[in-house]
Amino acid sequence: MKLLPFAIPVLYATIILVSLYVPEAVGVANNGDFIRVLQPNRITFTESGLQIKKSYEAVYKMILSDGSYVQKIANFLQSDYSRYDYLTSQSIPIKISKILNLIFDVLTGAPHDVYNMFWLFFIYDITYAYSFYLILSYIYKRFGACWFIYASITGLIVFCDQGYTLYFNSLYGEALQLVSTFLCIGLFLRLTERMNNRSLMLYYAAVAVMATSKTANIPVGLLFSVLPLSLLYEKKRAFRVYILACSTSTALLLLFFFYFLTPDWIERDNNFDAVFDGVLVSSKSPGQDLKELGLDPSYAVLAGLNAYSPETPINIKTAAFKAGFYGNIGKAKIVIFYLEHPGRFLLAMEYSAGYADYIRAPYLTNMQNSQVPAEQSYRFSIWEYVRVRSGVNNLCVTAILLAAAFSVSIRAIFKSLKKGGLLSGIELPFLIIVIIASAATDFIIPYIGNGICDIGKHMFGFIHFYDIIIFFLIGMLFSLSKRNGRV
């Protein structure tokens, strides 16, 4: 039984491998975003990989430098931000996968510039399995066999679902977002057992990777940066000081990253989408809405378009439009607009909830050489099949489940405080509260920050937090009924 916390994650990794590679590799097709991580990491498309959204591409080409062998090696991991100044922690696993690809190419005699997505998948798969090893080990030691079995089955059926793992075979930030989130949870649980500086540093390193996997993930990273504050009851004064120092410095680092290292083009495109493909989507008077946002009402002809629309009624690349629109809009104005129009905010959230059914983005094919647009593989998608038909993508249901989980967590904290007024034991309900807050944040940000453009993919962050909450509540109901003698 003691080997199970190790064996179960190995099983997960194997099932994920089989579901994505047998009989042929499947992943997620490029919607146009791949170039922003390919170019900085000196990787490019093959001739067959240029058709965006048409098929999943498994093989790319690494750009190797000219010159001596030493120069080639020296430049191999060099970044190139000449075209896309897109900083992301995605570059870490990508650069490691480049090394693995080069080693494999040399050993097999293949051309040295071949980049196979398998090695990036391999990094994600192993890290994901290790995260579950940390989580399941903690659950087994802390809560015993019943909770361990329940958590293991949940991990297998829910979080090994192909809807989640398809992103491992892609260059989207969602893969690292998912893997690093579970790594943060696992490292935090280990930290509660091993309260030392090394464990704390590992945790905050994972938080930094998770938060910078996508710019939209930084608010969640800020929430996770305060999570170790629940351990301030530790008697060692030096460790408490270390927690405060790490929490503060990580939060400041993430804020610096958000305000100073987010590329201007991302901010511009997101604001365009948030207004014309967001605020104006459900508008009965788009000109008036633009006035309230401090914008020219004549821009109303752009309603329903996004920043990547091939044709627009007016030229959005002129200096006049850039000054008139981008110079007069920001996230604060958009948020204030929704605060002043709560009915519109509610409509936006109902729209977002409607896209929280599929885990995957169903409009992007995951097949190579797909025969029809958005062709899908469903080799291991039991949970996605159930959740699409379960009604969880309903705003009222979502609000009730988040509120219920919050209530359970607050009750657990008060119960802990009643036991002699000690704070010891609040770290787990505190973790659930952070997960709830992260779910709420990732529920609101996609529509408000980027409109409906690609919202099926942007809801991914909310979905994995939401699924954790759903199965936490199911587990608590089972535990309660067992204590009451009904099971």
Image (spheres, rainbow, N blue to C red):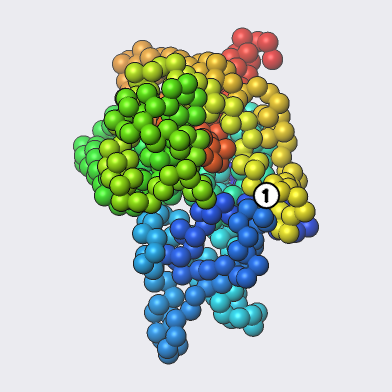
Image quarter for residue 136? top right
Mark 1, residue position? 365
Residue 434 vertical position relative to residue 45 in the rendered view, above or below: above
Q: Residue at x 65, y 43 (%)?
A: 363
Q: Nearer the viewer, residue 19 or 188?
A: 19
Residue 466 vertical position relative to residue 189 in the rendered view, above or below: above
Q: Nearer the viewer, residue 15 or 97?
A: 97
Image position of 414 (left or right of 123) = left
Q: Residue at x 47, y 21 (%)?
A: 284
Q: Amino acid at mark 1?
A: Thr
Query: Within 10 Å of the Cα at label 1, are there few (<14), some (14-19), or many (20+) other Cα atoms?
Result: many
Image position of 314 (left or right of 226) = right
For label 1, the SS is loop
Residue 146 vertical position relative to residue 339 in the rendered view, above or below: below
Task: Name the spot of residue 413 as percent of width and height, x first.
Answer: 39, 19
Task: Name the spot of residue 291 as percent of width and height, x first.
Answer: 32, 27
Q: Residue at x 36, y 67 (%)?
A: 82
Image quarter for residue 441? top left
